[in-house]
Image (cartoon, rainbow, N blue to C red):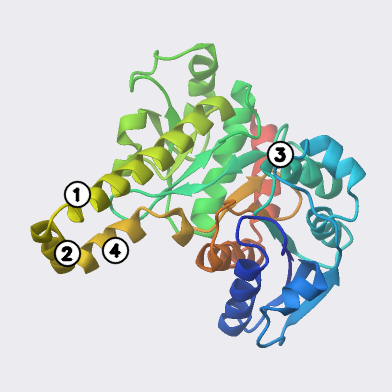
Amino acid sequence: MKIALDAMGGDHAPKAQVLAAQEAIHTFDDLEIILVGHEEEIKKFITNDKGLTILHTTEKIEDTDQPTTAVRRKKDSSMVLAMREVKEGRADAAISAGNTGALMTAGLLYVGRISGIDRPALSPMLPTMNGNGFLLLDVGANMDAKPEQLLQYAIMGETYMEMVMKRKRPRVGLLNVGTESGKGNELTKHAFPLLESASFNFIGNVEARDLLNGVADVVVCDGFAGNIVLKSIEGTAGSLFSLLKKEFTKSLKNKLAAGVLKSDLQGLKSKMSYSEYGGAGLFGLKSPIIKAHGSSDDTAVFHAIRQAREMVEQQVVTIIKSEVSRNKKEQ
């Protein structure tokens, strides 16, 4: 199995990517990784090149670049070359921590959509208090969704949670302003009966306040609402830990208390960290494409590699194709 890794995308590139790639090769016997990026910069961090190959390029897409323009003009960028490795069959999946919009554009342009999927969904795993996490589709790939697209998101999310996360009959919820079936805007009101009549385990509407309590395994919504949920969770978690740090360093008494609680606090931080879950899958494309967080360290990139490997191994894309086709025939 081969995975193309954009080694130049993200805040900690290429160090985080190289360290993660070496750890992944050591962990998974069946894995080969293509590091796409500036060869001299990449080699600075390689201590063992077993299972690694470098696809050299000096061009990269910046976070400040306009996505569509950058993908079309920077055809030799590390991100675009990683997508081409997948398109041309030299890699089974690709990962980037770079410009989200550009990755979405490159994925659509080079990898392409699954037949029957109108719009791909950007789908991260987010933490819950019990440590299991939930999958949120969509968080910004498609700001304006149609009811039929929310059904497609649910099918893709249910397949991923069952095949990769090993959840039996994962619970699928529709993000809404209330749990009653008649609640919401025109989108959610029309999506509800579509989800209710599907064969997966639809549990109805779910509210944002219950997400971190693990109310559902899969939560579907349009990209506008999903992005607000994502940023709210990230911001709240960041603010909470900043407040705790400030309080625990305020006085000697608090510092002593922090010393006693250090392992517990680290466990809490780990439970609420995105890095343990991998990246956000671009579900709906013909091959697994993973968007790692821009600030990913080597741990987060490693889990993104693990995630991509499991999607290939479990043939998630093939199963999504089958489920989408079956659902269309039943409608």
Q: Which residue is mark 4?
A: 266
In the image, what residue occupies the spot 84% across and 44% down? 71
C-beta proximity under 8 Å, tags 4 and 3:
no
Task: Please state, as top left, top right, bottom left or bottom right, where the N terminus lies in the image.
Answer: bottom right
Circle 1: residue type: Glu
The single residue placed furthest to the front in the displayed view is 251
Q: Which residue is mark 1?
A: 247
In the image, what residue occupies the spot 39% across and 51% down? 133
Q: Nearer the viewer, residue 39 or 168?
A: 39
Q: Earlier in the sequence, mark 1 or mark 2?
A: 1
Q: Which residue is mark 2?
A: 261
Structural crowding at the residue carrying mark 3, measured as other residues with C-alpha within 10 Å and reported as few (<14), some (14–19) or many (≥20): some
Q: Which residue is mark 3?
A: 101
Circle 4: residue type: Gln
Marks 4/2: CA–CA distance = 9 Å
The single residue placed furthest to the left in the displayed view is 253
Circle 3: residue type: Gly
Does residue 263 appear in this view?
Answer: yes
In the image, what residue occupies the spot 57% across and 79% down? 23
Front tag of 3 and 2: 2
Q: Secondary structure at mark 2?
A: helix
In the image, what residue occupies the spot 63% across and 70% down? 15
| Above or below: residue 291 compared with residue 50 | above
Does residue 1 appear in this view?
Answer: no
Coordinates of residue 207 in the picture (x, y in percent): 35, 28
